[in-house]
Amino acid sequence: MMPMMVHENYLACCESMAQARAAASSVALGDICSTKLRRHQKWGLMPTAAHLAVANPTLAVSPHLDLEWPRFPIVLAKSQTMKKSQRLLKELHGRLSGKVRARPQAVMEDYADLIYRRVCEPLVAEGVRGRQEAFKRLHGFRLRKEHMEHLQDLRFASQQDIFGNLDPKLKLQFTLFCKSEEKAPAIRRVAKGDKKLATTEELDVRKVVSDSDSEPE
C-alpha cells in the first residue's frame, strides 16, 4: 500500500524538475524490483524494493511541503474496471483465435479498433440499409452483437466511439436484426432434427418448439 501511496502523491511535493526526476527514477526502479520479487519469488529483495519505492522518493522531494490530504491510489479504485477489461479481452481473444493469430494485448492494441471501425462503416454510410453488411462483417470475425459492446469497452480514450454516436433508432434496428439472424441457424437446425451437440440457445429453441407442439389443440 505504501509504495502506491507514494506513487500517487510524490509529484505534489516536488518544487523542481530535478526533484521530480529523482523521485520518478526511484519509483520506477522500485516497481521493477517489486515485479521481479513477486514474479520470481525473490523475497530477499523486499528491503531493496521498499527502500527504492518509498524511502528514496520521500527523501528526494521537499520535506516542508505538507499535503492537506493524501490521495488514495487510483489504481485500486479502478481495479474492478481493470478486471472487467481483462475478462472481455480474454473472451474476445478466444472468439478471434480462428481468424487472428496474436496475443491478447496485441488484439486490443492492433485489431480491436480496426474490427470495430470495419463493422461500423456500413451503418455510418448507409444507415438502416447497411445493417446486413455490418452483421456480415461482424459474423465474418466469428463475433456476435454482444461483442460490439466488448469492442466499445476496450477502446482507448483517444479512439472514436462510432457505434455509440449512431442514432439510437439505428442501433436498435441493428440489434434486432442481429438477434434475428443469430437465432435463425438454430431454428433451422432444430426444424431439421439435427442430433449434433446443441448450444444453450438451441436448447432453448428446442424447448419452445416442443412446448408448442405439446399444447392441446
Image (cartoon, grey):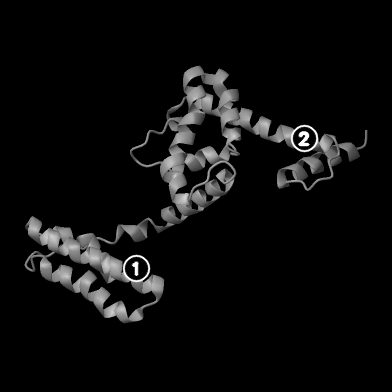
Vertical placement of residue 103 versus 174, above or below: below
Vertical placement of residue 126 versus 44, above or below: above
Vertical placement of residue 89 versus 79, above or below: above
Considering every residue shown, the one lying at the far front of the view is 101
Identify which amino acid the numbered label 2 is placed on: Ile
Q: Residue at x 51, y 23 (%)?
A: 122
Q: Residue at x 78, y 48 (%)?
A: 197
List x then y, in percent, for residue 43: 35, 80
Instruction: Confirm whether residue 6 shows in the render.
Output: no
Which corner quadrant holds the C terminus? top right
Q: Which mark is residue 35?
A: 1
Instruction: Confirm whether residue 64 shows in the render.
Output: yes
Which corner quadrant holds the N terminus? bottom left
List x then y, in percent, for residue 54: 21, 71
Location of residue 67 by image quarter = bottom left
Q: For mark 1, does the 10 Å Cα neighbourhood hold few (<14), some (14 to 19), or many (20 or more) residues?
A: some
Vertical placement of residue 77 versus 46, above or below: above
Q: Nearer the viewer, mark 1 or mark 2?
A: 1
Identify which amino acid the numbered label 1 is placed on: Thr
Q: Which mark is residue 187?
A: 2
Q: For mark 2, does the 10 Å Cα neighbourhood hold few (<14), some (14 to 19), or many (20 or more) residues?
A: some
Q: Which mark is residue 120?
A: none
Q: CA distance from mark 1 to mark 2?
A: 52 Å
Under circle 1, the secondary element is helix
List x then y, in percent, for residue 80: 43, 56
Say whether residue 83 is left or right of residue 131: left
Say whether residue 118 is left or right of residue 58: right
Considering only order in the chain, which callout, 2 or 1, is on the residue closer to the N terminus? 1
Number of marks drawn = 2
List x then y, in percent, for residue 5: 25, 66
Under circle 2, the secondary element is helix
